Image: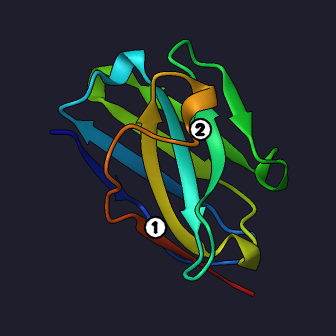
Amino acid sequence: QVHLVESGGGLVQAGGSLRLSCVASGSTFASEAIGWYRQVPGNQRDLVAAISPSGQMSYLDVVKDRFTISRDNAKNTAYLQMNNLKPEDTAIYFCNAANRVVLLGTPLYSWGQGTQVTVSS
């Protein structure tokens, strides 16, 4: 059974930075595409960043040039570096995986608890 554990969220002022981590236990992490998602309660969960097994990255337009996704396959860990944070980035952030980036809309695993990011103006 795969467990996803997100961490690194917190309260930050607008313009600040946070680095989120996602540890995946029990998965074939290195061969999977990884996605970071965010959700505001009552809204749908959106994919904001993705990284392929080979390291190709893609981003939602509203976070491009501010967020950077990366992965450390040796540690079964993915990261999301978030810079120049804005109040509209406030959400719960989750990670998940899929066999390919295009399949991250229907990820493989049960969702973890996520990590709350709150950006004050």
- Tag 2, which secondary structure? strand
Residue under the image location 41 percent in, 61 percent down: 8
Specify whether residue 20 is in view: yes
Q: Which residue is mark 1?
A: 9
Q: Residue 52, relative to residue 116: is it above or below? A: above
Residue 20: percent from left, percent from top: 47, 53
Q: Residues within 10 Å of mark 1 (few under 14, many from 20)?
A: some
Q: Quadrant of the N terminus?
A: top left
In the image, taking residue 48 as reference, residue 73 lies left or right, namely left
State which quarter of the image contains the C terminus.
bottom right
Q: Residue furthest bottom?
A: 121
Q: Which residue is mark 2?
A: 69
Instruction: Identify the residue shown where x is 18% and y is 32%.
Output: 26
Query: What type is the residue that disc 1 sits on?
Result: Gly
Q: Amino acid at mark 2?
A: Ile
Residue 77: quadrant of the picture: top left
Count every numbered label the image shows and give the total.
2
